[in-house]
Image (tube, rainbow, N blue to C red):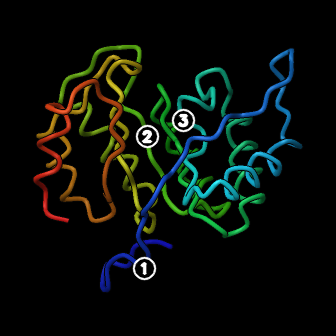
Amino acid sequence: MGYDRKTGWTATFRGVVVAPLTPLGDGGELRLELVPQEVEFLLKGGVSGLMVGGTTSEFITLDVAERRDVLEAFVRAVDGRAPVIAHIGHVDRRSAGLLAAHARDVGADATTAIAPYYHRVSEPACADYFATLARVTPDLPFFVYNYPDAAGNAVSFGVFEALLDIPNVAGAKHSVATFEELEPYLSLPR
């Protein structure tokens, strides 16, 4: 799975991709021994891929080392049976870049990042954030993660369209409130 600049995508992402939960104990400690059970449940249920470490995975409550451990556990449990997309978004661009390199090194099939969060950023700063992260792993597909209600920053259609000039930007995950917000993206060539 990946991108080759000469031949294009070596595989496509299709079907239902879910964001699995990160199993946590009562005290908030990671319960990674439960990951294989969760993966089996999801794959038997027919999902075609997993986006690990996103908003439903409690990424904002985990430190970078914990996020690495979670991704490794899911990649091992999936064992190549479905694509694993690693969420690498972080308020600190350096940490996000380290998460991207780690995702590549442990065998994730793609990366994604939520828009910068907590502080409002300009459109050029938002575009620069995504471009920087996509370029960390040019051999992996990168998906823009647009969830303005959670991030506090929306990814405009113009920003996304400009990011398509980066060869490994493969698409977007949109968590938006209305069809009107999504509609411009549907007009892009496939």
Residue at the image position 38 percent from the left and 21 percent from the top: 151
Which residue has dot 3 on it?
Answer: 54
The extreme front residue here reads: 45
Amino acid carrying label 2: it is Ala
Q: Residue at x 86, y 16 (%)?
A: 26
Q: Secondary structure at mark 2?
A: strand
Q: Residue at x 53, y 29 (%)?
A: 55
Res 174 → quadrant: top left
The nearer-to-camera label among 2 and 3 is: 3
Name the quadrant of the C terminus. Answer: bottom left
Measuring from the top left, give residue 56's x and y in whole percent. 58, 29
- Amino acid type of disc 1? Thr
Q: Earlier in the sequence, mark 3 or mark 1?
A: 1
Q: Residues within 10 Å of mark 1 (few under 14, many from 20)?
A: few
Q: Earlier in the sequence, mark 2 or mark 3?
A: 3
Residue that numbered label 2 is attached to: 113
Q: Is residue 34 above or below residue 124?
A: below
Element assignment for label 3:
loop
Q: Are marks 1 and 2 in contact (CB under 8 Å)?
A: no
Q: Which residue is mark 1?
A: 10
Q: Secondary structure at mark 1?
A: loop
Q: Nearer the viewer, residue 86 or 92?
A: 86
